Image (cartoon, rainbow, N blue to C red):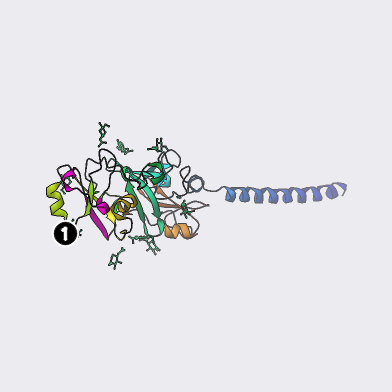
């Protein structure tokens, strides 16, 4: 009898502590946020506010599985994110994640206006090859953009039409740029004796003239998994390099498309 009174509270205490231990364990495991999710928050380059996330990743700062192969970005000396396309450096001005578009310009065209002594903010134009990007497996040139042609060595066309001038340093003062459909382009091409370089610019930037158009650059669209469902369900997009496919990293685990309990890892 004495023993019974002693044991009963003891055993219920033990049961209670087992229950507590069980809940602690369950709670603990569900609190373990998926490491892929933890690894892939959006980042920025220093001194720049463009958020970088899937399909892009900053090489050395974000894990490659936070983005797609072919979308590595580096951070340029002025903070701009830089994309390497066909061995040419492009500055990323803005990324529109909602429609998978980004605006880039050739790094050669993007010297900041304040950094030049000339008030016009002339662009350096040391280009030696065409900048008509071929379509890559990752990027296409967005629709509605114009071809522009740069002519070097146009000394004989003095006085230079101001709205077509690009360079104004000693070496580049006679570089002229024309939209390809310009009526005067054949006359120009006959009178300029230097290189001819083709590039692409976004439509509808007429106010600042050709220099502004070159500086603003062009729009590219990208081909990668569509992140919008994953993102709006609270996940972070990523890439499984073994299965070579898109993944949605959620706080609980990796899903195939979005954070949804019925949505298996595929
Ligand atoms: C980033 O900075 C630019 C100019 O500095 C500004 O126009 C833009 O609104 C900023 N974007 C965000 C998301 O803060
Ligand atoms: C980036 O472009 C440069 C040429 O500007 C090239 O030498 C380099 O290999 C490229 N890097 C990558 C990672 O593709
Ligand atoms: C991505 O998916 C969303 C929702 O399913 C859709 O509205 C959007 O148009 C898609 N984006 C692209 C670029 O296909
Ligand atoms: C994507 O959206 C941006 C901003 O709204 C727009 O400027 C751009 O033209 C769009 N891209 C395409 C391919 O429509
Ligand atoms: C432009 O800025 C960079 C660094 O910000 C500096 O090193 C360079 O000398 C500047 N160039 C001119 C022409 O002021
Ligand atoms: C650029 O392409 C055009 C043809 O589209 C060609 O005539 C020209 O020589 C090319 N320029 C350079 C620098 O390769
Ligand atoms: C391209 O231009 C046409 C005509 O101006 C317009 O209807 C179409 O929406 C534009 N497409 C894009 C992607 O901006
Ligand atoms: C251009 O620069 C070179 C040396 O850098 C100089 O000899 C030449 O006189 C300059 N030409 C003009 C027009 O300023
Ligand atoms: C072509 O050049 C002539 C003479 O320089 C100029 O008056 C005319 O406006 C130019 N036409 C175009 C379409 O730029």
Name which quarter of the figure residue 141 lies in.
bottom left
Label 1 element class: loop
**Residue 258 seen in the figure:** no
Q: How far across and down, in percent of the image, does residue 192 sit?
A: 15, 46
Q: Is residue 194 above or below residue 262?
A: above
- Left or right of residue 194, residue 107 in this image: right
Q: How far across and down, in percent of the image, does residue 200 sit?
A: 26, 52
Q: Residues within 10 Å of mark 1 (few under 14, many from 20)?
A: few
Residue most extreme to the right? 2
Ligand 3 sits in quadrant:
bottom left
- Left or right of residue 33, residue 266 in this image: left
State whether label 1 is within 8 Å of ligand 9: yes
Residue 159 in magenta stretch: yes
The quadrant in which the C terminus is found is bottom left
Q: Which residue occupies 22% across, 53% down? A: 178
Q: How far across and down, in percent of the image, does residue 234 sit?
A: 50, 57
Who is closer to the viewer here, 193 or 35? 193
Q: Which residue occupies 33% across, 43% down? A: 107
Residue 135 in magenta stretch: no
Highlighted magenta segment, given as a residue range: 143-164
Who is closer to the viewer here, 234 or 257? 234
**Residue 3 seen in the figure:** yes
Q: Which residue is label 1 attached to?
A: 183
Q: Which residue occupies 43% across, 46% down? A: 66
């Amino acid at each position: 009898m004495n023993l019974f009174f002693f044991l009963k509270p003891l055993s219920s205490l033990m049961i209670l502590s087992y229950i507590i231990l069980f809940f602690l364990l369950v709670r603990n495991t569900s609190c373990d946020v998926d490491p892929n999710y933890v690894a892939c928050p959006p980042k920025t380059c220093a001194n720049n506010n463009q958020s970088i996330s899937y399909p892009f990743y900053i090489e050395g700062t974000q894990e490659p599985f936070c983005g797609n192969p072919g979308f590595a970005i580096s951070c340029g000396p002025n903070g701009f994110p830089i994309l390497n396309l066909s061995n040419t450096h492009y500055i990323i001005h803005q990324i529109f994640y909602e429609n998978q578009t980004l605006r880039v310009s050739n790094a050669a065209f993007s010297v900041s206006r304040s950094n030049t002594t000339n008030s016009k903010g002339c662009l350096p134009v040391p280009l030696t090859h065409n900048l008509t990007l071929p379509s890559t497996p990752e990027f296409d040139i967005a629709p509605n953009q114009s071809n522009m042609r740069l002519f070097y060595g146009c000394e004989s066309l003095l006085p230079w039409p101001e709205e077509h001038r690009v360079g104004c340093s000693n070496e580049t003062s006679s570089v002229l740029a024309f939209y390809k459909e310009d009526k005067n382009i054949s006359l120009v091409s006959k009178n300029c004796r230097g290189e001819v370089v083709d590039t692409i610019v976004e439509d509808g930037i007429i106010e600042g003239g050709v220099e502004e158009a070159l500086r603003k650059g062009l729009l590219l669209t990208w081909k990668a998994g569509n992140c919008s469902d994953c993102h709006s369900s609270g996940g972070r997009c990523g890439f499984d390099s073994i299965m070579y496919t898109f993944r949605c990293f959620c706080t609980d685990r990796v899903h195939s498309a979005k954070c949804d309990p019925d949505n298996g890892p595929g």
